Every structure is written in structure tokens, then in C-alpha cells.
Image (tube, coloured by chain):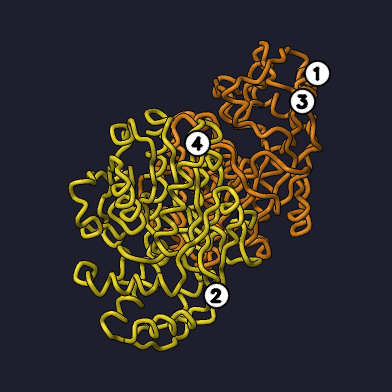
Chain colours: A yellow, B orange
Amino acid sequence: MVTGGLGFIGSNVACRLADLGADVLAVDAMMANCGGNLANIAGYEDRIKVDRTDLSQDANLDRLVEGRQIILNCAGRVAHYDSMVNPIADLDSNVVAQVNLLEACRRSAPQAAIVFTSTRQIYGKPQNLPVDEQHPLRPVDVNGINKLASEHYHQLYHDIHGLHVVSLRLTNTFGPRMRIKDARQTFLGVWLRAVVEERSFEVWGGDQLRDFSYIDDVVEAMLLAATVSACWGQIYNIGGTPPVSLLALAEQLVQIAGTGRFERKVFPAERKAIDIGDYFADDTKFRRATDWSPKWSLEAGLAAALDYYRRYLDCYV
Amino acid sequence: MVTGGLGFIGSNVACRLADLGADVLAVDAMMANCGGNLANIAGYEDRIKVDRTDLSQDANLDRLVEGRQIILNCAGRVAHYDSMVNPIADLDSNVVAQVNLLEACRRSAPQAAIVFTSTRQIYGKPQNLPVDEQHPLRPVDVNGINKLASEHYHQLYHDIHGLHVVSLRLTNTFGPRMRIKDARQTFLGVWLRAVVEERSFEVWGGDQLRDFSYIDDVVEAMLLAATVSACWGQIYNIGGTPPVSLLALAEQLVQIAGTGRFERKVFPAERKAIDIGDYFADDTKFRRATDWSPKWSLEAGLAAALDYYRRYLDCYV
């Protein structure tokens, strides 16, 4: 079972599971602006069952979780600025929905391994770099507060109710099937779209250092987390490429694409207030537990993403 | 304005404000088992206005907060075990309600000082004693997760929206107007009731060390937090008496009362799982900021509480 299974990360993991021969149920409410897109499972329609239940609106999700071996819990809202404008919507999707799901698992799927897609956002502005799992948790926006509460719930349902839960704190993740219509699912989506459409994009600030995970590496990490039982009950950072500045990233993207251009802009005040500045992860703990390491370089990942959106642009704009 | 204004802490602060001549609005939904009790404002009916709005069910609380100078935000559920049984009810009261309130303040009461009654529960099992505000935050039950999220919201609305917010992390608070019907609002309530009714009570475990705040000291701390502008934007522990073991507390209570007896019991397993063990606060930060210190000894506080429930037992059982 994959929650948010028609969204960016969820659909990638659902398709991978289908390729592996699994019986896959993708649950996705297709909420506006959240990345759910039927095009994400094109070619997989006969191998992925789809259920449109909104997890936040249904306290009886037992029918969905019963008998499932693995639950990849990718559902949620990710847009930081939207969360400040409508905190209750973010709370519904990122906390209420998660509690409903965990309660159903407690009652009806205690056997399932549950992987929760947490986020680096819960650390807030890093006090030191790279950031490991011991770093203080000081979310700087509503989305971060709600994702942290949800991670706490996941850990609690492991500690108290014995569910097999793993939380992965992801960094900027990119690749095929992501939302590129606007910046709600990372700024990199808008950049990719602009480059493919041969338009100019904006770099806000530009000095911020970030690491980037290519989606296939994240999917691999999620499947390991679900199946390596030593991971259950643990929280792990998932990092990616060596950190680059956003300016260097923009230059690399334009160079790889052979098209596009960008302008540097001052960070808009209302976004700057909730920006976390530099971030890159120390993911030693997960590498040691699973022998995982990212296989994709930033260059190869950007090239693969560009190739995907050049072919399927119509489905994402 | 006092949210949870008919409950234990809320009614005490509302009555104190009325004594000081303030125009007081007590908002309280009188949720079952949460401590709201009209007897708590007996004698103050003409000086405290009451509104029965459920903050979690109303996204437009602007009419309540408009023009208020001070908002003492005491509404919420406090029962740890109940929160594990019905997490969504706890989430509604302790997070959704708080977000609705903060959103109304952002729109319609940016001038108000807001004091949030947070809790030591958000620290989880202490790693070191006494616990200061830098201690890691690792809630061990649903109530702790939700109170932590709510505290994060309060801080965010200070940091981003400029509201004048102070969070006070209270420890075991006791005194007149608390709920004593059962153990939902600290075990001490049941103990007090048993002693007044000359029945036996149970001490679960008994070696746990705790500190106790008498309600009048907490009310004083809340009024200082609201009015000393240097406190706004800060988070403070509020401590109390020197730590005592629960066994020593039980012995002291029986001795002061001259009635009652108790039995030591093994901690029930489902409660032990969410117990935090020893706790006592380092509240140096708040003492330095305000010159506050607790005025009530444990002995004097217990005597005052016993005297209150002997007179008004009928209103609380």
C-alpha cells in the first residue's frame, strides 16, 4: 500500500513495487496542488489498484490496511508557504490523516512495515552542518510543525503499540513524476519546467547550500527501510549529492539542458522568513544500517529528469 | 480573555483577574472530563462573562479576541491515558483549537499578550535532572505530541506574525478548583478526594520524584508572563516545591489531613508505558526574567486544597 500513491514519491515507489511483482494499492485523494497525477502511473494501470479515499476524512481505514505487508506512507502536503496561509488544511493532511492511518494499522495491520516520509524541514535552520539525527528539532513553518508531530506519532505507535515503523527524513528530492507546475514541490520543479519550455527562471538568493536526492535513490532507501527489520523503530536522515549552492545548481541545469536562462532575485520577504538557509544531511546512520548509498550523481539525475519532462511535459503543466 | 476559563487553571486566573478589576471573558466548551465547572466561578458570576464556544469547531474566533489585551490560553485536554485511547479528540482540542485561536489573534488581536499553558510532558522521560528549557523534546504520549505541536505553533506565530506569545511549561499543578473526580487531572486530585471522603487511595509506584506548583503561584507566573514584555517570544519552565517522592507526598497528605490512608500498588502496565519517571524543573530562566518565585510550600498548599474541598466537595464529585 502506498499513500499519496499518485503523487511524486508515492507513484515512483508504487511503480517500482509493481515492477517487482507486488500487489500494489495506491491511495490518493488527488488534492489540488499536491502532486497527485494519473499520468504518474501511465502504463501501470493494470498493475496498480487506485483508491481515492481522503485519509483525513475517514476514521475507519481498516479496510485499506488489512493484510498489507508494507505501507509506504507518502501522503501529505509539502508546500511551506501554503501551510502558513492555510494551517488547518496542512494539519488535516499531515497530522489528522496520519493519526487515522496509524490507528487503523494498530487495529488491523500490526504486521505491516510502515515507512513514513518525514522531512529535513523539521530541523528548522541548521545550527551546524552536516545535520545528523541528533540535531535539535525547531520547525520554522506550519508544514514543519505538522510533519514533526506526525513523525512523533509514528515513533509513538512503534514504542507503545509495537508497529514496525521507520521514519526517513528526506532532503530535496527530484526526478520524474514530480510536480513542476509551480514551486509547491521544491523550486527545482519550476526550474525544470522553465528550462524545458526554454523560458527564464528565477533564483531566489542563490548562496544557499543544499543536497539533492534523485528519486530512484529515495525509492531504494524506502524499500530497504521497510524490509531490513533492524531499521524498524528508527529515524534516519536520507541525504544525497554533495551540497551545491542554488546558483551552481542553476548553472549546471542550464548547461546540461543546453537551453534556458535564469535571473538572480532577492528572496521575497514572506518566503525568506520561513527559509532554512543552508542544509545538507549526515546520513551515516542509514548507510551503516543498510549499506545504502546514493547511486545517482546530480548531473545524471538532472539529465534524466530533463529527458522525462521533455517527453511528457503535457502531463505536468 | 481566558480559554478553558471554567477549568482548573483557567478559572483561577479568571477569578484573580476579576479581583484585579479586569473585564474578563471566560471561554469554555465544558467538554466532558476536562475540568470545566460552573462552581469554579461561584461568586464571580457578575464579573466574569462566559462564552461556551468550542474553539476546535469554529474557524472564526475573531469576535472573541477582538480588543483583548491579555489572552490566557488554558483550554485543552490534559489526560494522558485518554489521549492514547482517542488521539483525534486530543488533537482537536490541543492543536486544531489552538490554531483557530492563533489565526484569529493574527487577524484581529495582534496587540494581545498571549500566555500558553504548555507542559513538562513534552520533555518525555528526563535525560537529566533538573530539566531546563534546553532539554530535548521527546513526548511519550499523544497528549505530549499535541501539546508540543501547539507550543511550536505559538512560537511560530510570535516569530513570523509578531504576536506577543509566552509559553509556560507547567509541572504538576494543584489547588482549589481542580478536577478531583478521577485521575484525569493529575493523580493528586483522586488522592485529595479520597482523603476528604476518608477513603483509601492508591499510590502507583511511589519512588517517582516530582515537583508541585500551587495554583496561586502559577496564576502569578501567568500574569507576569503576560505583562513583562521581555518575556514575549520566550519559553519558560515553571517549577514549584523541592522534589518529593510520591510516597513522601502521600504520607505528608495523610498527615496534614489527619484522615485517609493509602496502599502502594505496582504501576499498571498500560500506564507505566507512558509514565515519565522522575521529573523536576529548573525554572531559573523565569525567575531571572521576572523575579518570580513560588510563595507556597507544599504543606501550605496541601492544607489550603484540603480546606477547599472539605467545604465544596459536593461541587466536585
Question: What is the spatial separation of the Cα atoms under label 3 and label 4, in whole angstroms?
Answer: 27 Å
At x 71%, y 12%, the residue is B263
The answer for which chain carries disc 2 is A
Q: Which-is-in-front pick, marks 1 and 4? A: 4
- For residue A157, which numbered disc appears in the image? 4
| Residue under label 1 | B255
Question: What is the spatial separation of the Cα atoms under label 4 and label 2, in whole angstroms?
Answer: 35 Å
Q: Are marks 1 and 3 in contact (CB under 8 Å)?
A: no
| Residue under label 2 | A209
Q: Which-is-in-front pick, marks 1 and 3? A: 3
Q: Position of residue A91 (x, y in %)?
A: 40, 51
Question: What is the spatial separation of the Cα atoms under label 2 and label 3, in whole angstroms?
Answer: 50 Å
Q: Is residue A222 visible?
A: yes
Same chain shared by disc 1 and disc 2: no
Identify residue type, mark 1.
Gln
Same chain shared by disc 1 and disc 3: yes
Name the side, left or right, on which A2 lies relative to B269.
Answer: left
Identify residue type, mark 3.
Asp
- For residue B207, which numbered disc appears in the image? 3
